Amino acid sequence: MIRYLIKNNFKLMFRNKWSIVVMLLGPVLVIAVLSSAFSELMKSYESVEEFNVGYRVESESMVSGYIESIREAGKEAGITFYEYKEGNPEELMAKHDLAGFVKFTKEEYVLYQSADDEVEGMTLEYFLDRVMSENVNVSLQMMNATRQNDVELPVQELEFMPAINAVDYYGIIYIVYFSWCGIICATGVFSNEKKYGIERKFRVSNVSEMKLYLGKFIPINMTVVGGMGISTIITVLLHGVHWGKPLLSAMIIFGMILAGNAFGMMLYQLSKNLAITIIVQFTIVWILGFLGGSFETYMFSSTPDFLKHLSPIYHGNRALVELSCMGQSEYVGSAIVYSLVITAICSAIAILAGEMRKRGRA
Amino acid sequence: MEEIILKTTDLTKKYNNKAVVDNLNLEIRRGEIFGLLGPNGAGKSTTMNMICSIVTPTAGSIELLGKNPRKQKKEVIHKIGYIPQELAIHGNLKAWENVELFTSLYGIKGEELKSTVNESLEYVGLLERRQEFAKNFSGGMKRRLNIACAIGHHPELLIFDEPTVGIDPQSRNFILDKIKESNQKGATVIYTSHYMEEVEAICTRIAIMDNGKIIACGTSEELKKLVNNEKEDITLEEVFLTLTGKKLRDYAE
């Protein structure tokens, strides 16, 4: 019987054309508009041409013991550091064609940027932010513990923004974002069931809550997977979005689609109100997207780490962006596990809620 | 003695401590067309919903084909065909798709399902309109489709909850004929309505319900004798009004 539920729910979804159009055209349009509008801002993430930076370490500076490690990390990020023990930073920048200058004082650093090298300046700023906020702190703790002055900075663990352009960045994160909003496809099913009082008919039958759930969950997911697949192909063809490791990327997106739809179906099963479901789901997805980098050009910058890591969208975005620009990511596992856990929990709650509602009435 | 197909014992449903169905005792025999009459808010639909396991009784018991429909739902639910008062069909599905969906819920599939869908649509006179969307149907056609969706699994007990509300006389006659036809083929029918002439025309026994209780039960003739032995041409409506009063009922069930 589940075959007929799936088949007819498919028909109900596809006959509600506007939601399908939103799912198909939404990502394509948003990606086109945002990648174009922010292409200038996103230059800071584009493959950085190597550039030179001057620096000075003042006495008792917190980085004095491991400036070499920072230089080494800079080299990996395309930044060559030259030490200037004396001289006015601005004059040195002009004289030696430096893109920036960093003065490491006792407890902070001062960054000089050139108006002519804005992109390099932003890259340097981000690089220093990452180095100083994370790894140096770790190293300082190690220094205090061991009382050594020559602790080596773990260069391989330095996190700097991977090189990515605006088209790839927005082309990826908005496929992720819309994958979480796939429940919109189900409006045709939910609104029909509500409008025509179909649930009562289901109650006067032997169909189980599990079958009713899967009868919707399967076609909704297939529709969203199809929609996102088409959107992805369109954006690849039209804008040249580059995805790294297609199979792995597809798995991550698939996981996100399952999680988004399971979450939406749980909300509907709990509220039995389509408007509430859409409003709550879109609000929560917006918050998760906000934390996860969907609305900022600087995906990993302004949100505290613990908040970012709470957002499954962050894990998906980060994994896919890194796969695109580096070919690997430590976030692949967490993105997939996060999605599967959300799918399992939300599905269980939705089925349980339906069963309890049925028992409450029947 | 005829088999009792449905028996309710002290069946009660309360909402906010107010009894909508109050200690209802009913016995319906196999092969009957049993009419349940009552003003708005009398408790007819709630009773039907409890029989169909859509609503949980507050107290009392239901015995359907010798089984408890709450505890043995799987064993008896497919023997019921429920035609709810509000239309329960998908407007965005075609007529045949609606019948296919609801018939498949009872485990019918494949070729059997295909032929059942056609039989059901033919039965309600919609076979030629099978490819049309239900939302484009007239009120009468929707009512007929609503019936087609509930009969495909050949239930032993058909429950019609006001199936002729808001439709033209032709559709009404058609539906009443089909109810009689189903009954002649062996189905037991419970029929609720506000229309006295309908109930009088097709029902073998009639119960009048008010304030959640059965206040009278019997054949049409027996009911007429209950209220007036002098007047010969008394109508069922006069019986109904005498028993339930003329005061307006503005309840919602």
Image (cartoon, coloured by chain):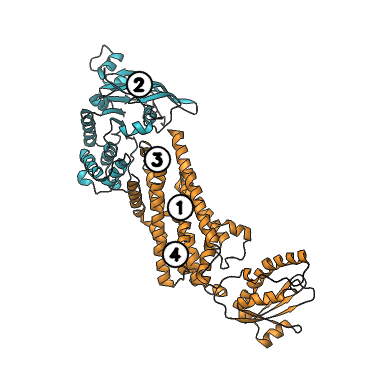
Task: Give me the C-alpha separation between circle 1 and circle 4.
Answer: 21 Å
Labels 3 and 1 touching (C-beta < 8 A): no
Q: Which chain does the numbered disc 1 sit on?
A: A
Camera-side residue: A35 or A1? A1
| Residue type beneath disc 2 | Leu
Q: Quadrant of residue B109?
A: top left
Camera-side residue: A1 or B19? A1
Counting from the top left corner in percent of width and height, residue A171 is at: 47, 67
Task: Give me the C-alpha separation between circle 2 and circle 1.
Answer: 46 Å
Labels 4 and 2 touching (C-beta < 8 A): no
Q: Tag 2: Cα neighbours inside 10 Å, few (<14), some, or many (≥20)?
A: some
| Residue type beneath disc 4 | Leu
Nearer the observer, disc 4 or disc 2? 4
Residue, x 31% and y 28% (percent of image)? B192
Nearer the observer, disc 2 or disc 3? 3
Camera-side residue: B233 or A152? A152
Camera-side residue: A255 or B159? A255
**Chain B's shade in the image?**
cyan
Residue A261 shows which numbered tag? 1
Residue, x 27% and y 12% (percent of image)? B229
| Residue type beneath disc 3 | Ser
SS type, badge 1: helix
Q: Quadrant of the C terminus of chain B?
A: top left
**Residue assigned mark 3:** A208
Q: Which residue lies furthest to the bottom in this view?
A: A95
Q: Which chain does the numbered disc 2 sit on?
A: B
Do dots 2 and 3 share one subunit?
A: no
**Residue assigned mark 4:** A247
